[in-house]
Image: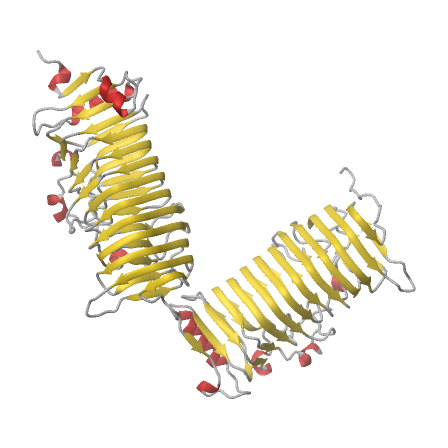
Amino acid sequence: METLGESMGLQHISPFKALYKAAGYSANAEVFTAGGPPNSDITAAVLKAFTSACQAPAPSQVLIPKGDFKLGETVMTGPCKSPIEFTLQGNVKADGGSTQGKDRWVVFEKINGFKLNGGGTFDGEGNAAWKANNCHKTFECKKLPISVRFDFVDNAEIKDITSLDAKNFHFNVISGKNMTFDNIKIIAPAESPNTDGIHLGRCEGVKILNTKIATGDDCISVGDGMKNLLIEKVVCGPGHGISVGSLGRYGWEQDVTDINVKNCTLEGTDNGLRIKTWPSAACTTTAAGIHFEDIILNKVSNPILIDQEYCPWNQCNKNKPSTIKLVDITFRNIRGTSGNKDAVKLLCSKGHPCENVEIGDINIDYTGPDGPPTFECTNVTPKLVGTQNPKACVGPVVKAPGKDIGSSSGSDITQALLKAFTSACQSPSPSKVVIPKGEFKLGEIEMRGPCKAPVEITLQGTVKADGNAIQGKEKWVVFGNINGFKLNGGGAFDGEGNAAWRVNNCHKTFNCKKLPISIRFDFVENAEIKDISSIDAKNFHINVLGAKNMTMSNIKITAPEDSPNTDGIHLGRSDGVKILNSFISTGDDCISVGDGTNNLHVEKVTCGPGHGISVGSLGRYGKEQDVSGIRVVNCTLQETDNGLRIKTWPSAACSTTASDIHFEDIIVKNVTNPILIDQEYCPWNQCNKKKASTIKLVNISFKNVRGTSGNKDAVKLLCSKGYPCQNVEIGDIDIKYSGADGPATFQCSNVSPKLLGAQSPEACSSPLTKLPGQ
């Protein structure tokens, strides 16, 4: 009489020691065999064998022997007490009846320590299902079962397995860690819809090696949350290539990082190496560190493709650019033939242009009648290494007014410049606007993005503010919302402020008529401003708001010392700005640092006349942000009304912190108030000095400041009695004063500075003033 287990096709064989020694497991491992008569249904036997293996205290094996068997929906769930090896020697075929209406067929989940091998086949028998599958055309469709799913499987090896004719994805891998796929064979016709070979998401440390994939969709598709994926020695085709994405369809997606595809071959695929993100994306994530290297192509359509306008079935809004950021992407040593003329297409997002894309040694031929092959770029400036075939994208130069288009010196170029900028901004490749030598009138103008690719403006001549066009305005020239921007050329912006200064009383009262700032940079990122002059601004010369990664070098700013409110460079809410090798001579602060400024580096700036280099004023408004990481080094101040200054309002409207502010290696020449912390800053007496400033000053240093003072107050550290300054360091100060009311003094309130080296004048020794109860 046969046992129940035998009637179900389940056999328990022990100890089977030789096999497990060879597999590296313990000699005490057990083997559970799930088999049966040819073409019998072994679903229950497989589940029982897996359950027994999963509960075994030692590593165990589930064995499906050679032969053809039917298998219905089978979900094998851990955790298991020990590692499991699942050896498929035969062929299991999807039982259409038991998988109809399901979204899965075979599932391995929540197993740590797993092997799948044996040389057998999962046959999804998808032929009949593909005819009724419209999921490649619409979201609203009836899902078909994925052949094999690995959900939360860690430390696994999948080897010597075939997937045939899946109804949907062949393999789906979610939230796995340390998995290796080796010598996998995936087969389905080119016209089979949605049959991705291996789809991965939310995994870390996966390897796909020595594998052949021929299917109807992506050979390998990389979803969100993937980290540390290696794809090597994979042959793909037919299919849709190897794709990172699509990304951005859902709102809860995670970053993708460190994807490496190397030594692979693509044959006759609809796409090659592809990164695809949705416009109007539901999330803002980053895909970074994606590298394709040593790839062979054979008649591959779209061999290299970044597509940030991926919108299948036209069910998204292409007018909204993708918010997925692509960073650090490389394509190296890609060679072979293209199936169409679009050999390289880098179609990046105008909202977040691709950053640090490198193209190296590309050799892709195309011999079709509509050739030669092309290399297209949008919103990206790739770094080119080695040779490129086809020739890499190069942006056009858009020329603005000049003799070549009929503008004569003295003419108004406002409309011509705006038109030229608009053309450059809409160009799919990096472009340049050139204003030639000569003098031109310029009215109020706003040049705003986002732009499709980086823009360079070369100002060779001088543009003068048209007084009639900017009368009553608060701005003259504005550059806004541009990522990847250059302004250079040696030319000048002349604000013609002389007449306006006479009627400007903003330095005496809040209630005044504003005058136009000469140049505004609003939310400009990854920018270089170089070799430009600003002359006689009516208000601030340069105002920088919301900038990231901006460098200003060799800037020259000039206005009389009695010109009111003509700050040289004012910054706020910006991160990563550098001001280098510049000369500023004006009527207010040479450089003024507003709230929300972080990581500012000022070096080799000469200031004077003017009001010095100031952090602040801070605390005037109620929604101000912290200031952090301000470094001023190797600068010279001459004949300025103040030197190195930090100023905050008493009765401040907010409570923020200004921290890590460092002044070092500074020369002062007849500077009034060379070193000044003023937390009682109250211009025009329109504040309440009896209320202490609530701005906290932390980690401040003045080191190696030397020269002469214009009055006896060489060093004044006037901190708030409400929030005394913390960790203020004074090192090697040597400031002389030779006036009749001398000698020079060093004054402190509500601060006990840490003293290093020598101090002249002698440093204050007053104690830290504390509020009652502190």
Does 644 appear above or below 130? below
Which of the image's four quarters has the N terminus? top left
Does 2 appear above or below 212? above
Q: Residue furthest front?
A: 386
Which of 127/231 is in front? 231
Q: How is the image coloured?
A: secondary structure
764 horizontally vs 212: left or right: right
3 horizontally vs 211: left or right: left
Which of the image's four quarters has the C terminus? top right
Does 739 appear above or below 631? below
> In terms of image quadrants, where is residue 679?
bottom right
Residue 18, position in %: x, y?
Answer: 23, 19
Q: Residue at x 25, y 65 (%)?
A: 341
Which of 84/420 is in front? 84
> In terms of image quadrants, where is residue 671?
bottom right
Q: Residue at x 19, y 70 (%)?
A: 369
Residue 397, position in %: x, y?
Answer: 42, 75
Exactly how many numbered labels are in the figure? 0
Residue 487, position in %: x, y?
Answer: 53, 70
Q: Is residue 292 visible?
A: yes
Q: Is residue 685 visible?
A: no
